[in-house]
Image: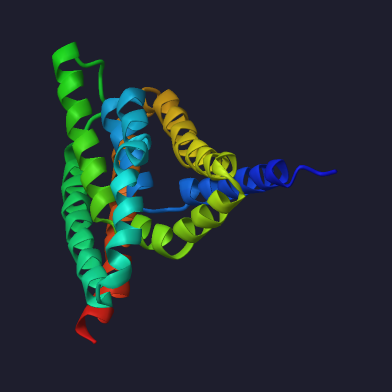
Amino acid sequence: MVDEGRVGSVGELALGLALGFSAGVSPGPLLALVLSGTLRGGLGAGLRIAAVPLMTDLPVILLSVAVLSVLPSRFVAAGGVVGGAFLLWLAVSTLREARTATPPTAADPVTARAQGRRVLRQGAVANLLSPHPWTFWLTTGAPVLVAAWRHGPPAAGGFLLGFYTLLVGSKAVLALAVARARHRIGTRAYRLLLAATGLLLLVASALLFTEFGTALLN
């Protein structure tokens, strides 16, 4: 006889892997911060930002299910506009820096730690203010998680394990690729790459304003 619980666990793990990879490589605020943070502060900074969902998503999961489902849609839209404003500030700061930036050299330990804390704070704030994690868990993640739990805790755990393994892992791989190349590029290429991450943040900000600003005004 087939063990339905085991089949369910494998299926939820596969679903988590698919959703995690899709979210991990999709252009968005956190991916842009992973790239810009790696360019500025090296692999350690990029990996810290890539791991931000592990530190911030628990309240997102709990509150999106318990609170946002009973609040008016304008509350979600307002959150999206605030997130867009924060990303706009990050984009402008990055584009300004790109005009005069030079390829980074090895920083002293104190400076490196300060840079690491700064980019980690930026990543955490961006992830919490972005409505995308909230809407994902409200519309897709939470229903899948509840359905998986009905198959048993291993199925729910498999879904979460698969999702976060590839959500964080895919961003970490991209950070590794950028970190290996950042010291081999010239000043012009470095400025262009940094400007590209600023433009990516700008696009993400515009998308948030377009998507949620319209809903807020209607």
Q: Is residue 1 visible from the viewing direction of this image?
A: yes
Q: Nearer the viewer, residue 90 or 170?
A: 170
Q: Using the rendered view, name the quadrant where residue 200 is placed.
A: bottom left
Q: Nearer the viewer, residue 24 or 3?
A: 3
Residue occupying image coordinates x 56% and y 57%:
147
Image quadrant in which the N terminus is located: top right
Describe residue 11's horizontal placement relative to residue 135 as left or right. Answer: right
Describe residue 183's horizontal placement relative to residue 165 as left or right. Answer: left
43 over 81 or under it: above or below: above
218 over 71 or under it: above or below: below
Residue at the right extreme?
Answer: 1
44 over 97 or under it: above or below: above
Residue occupying image coordinates x 22% and y 79%:
216
Q: Is residue 98 visible from the viewing direction of this image?
A: no
User: What sort of colour scheme is used for the picture?
Assistant: rainbow
Image quadrant in which the C terminus is located: bottom left
Q: Nearer the viewer, residue 203 or 30?
A: 30
Q: Using the rendered view, name the quadrant where residue 65 is placed.
A: bottom left
The percent position of residue 9, horizontal first and vertical second, equals 64, 43
The percent position of residue 88, horizontal first and vertical second, equals 20, 58
The percent position of residue 29, horizontal first and vertical second, equals 32, 51
Describe residue 127's horizontal placement relative to residue 179 as left or right. Answer: left
Residue at the front extreme?
Answer: 1
The percent position of residue 181, horizontal first and vertical second, equals 43, 27
Residue occupying image coordinates x 47% and y 52%:
26
Please give the count of numbered marks on the rendered protein.
0
Residue at the top extreme?
Answer: 109
Residue occupying image coordinates x 32% and y 73%:
211
Q: Using the rendered view, name the quadrant where residue 213 is placed.
A: bottom left
Residue at the bottom extreme?
Answer: 218
Q: Nearer the viewer, residue 115 or 76?
A: 76
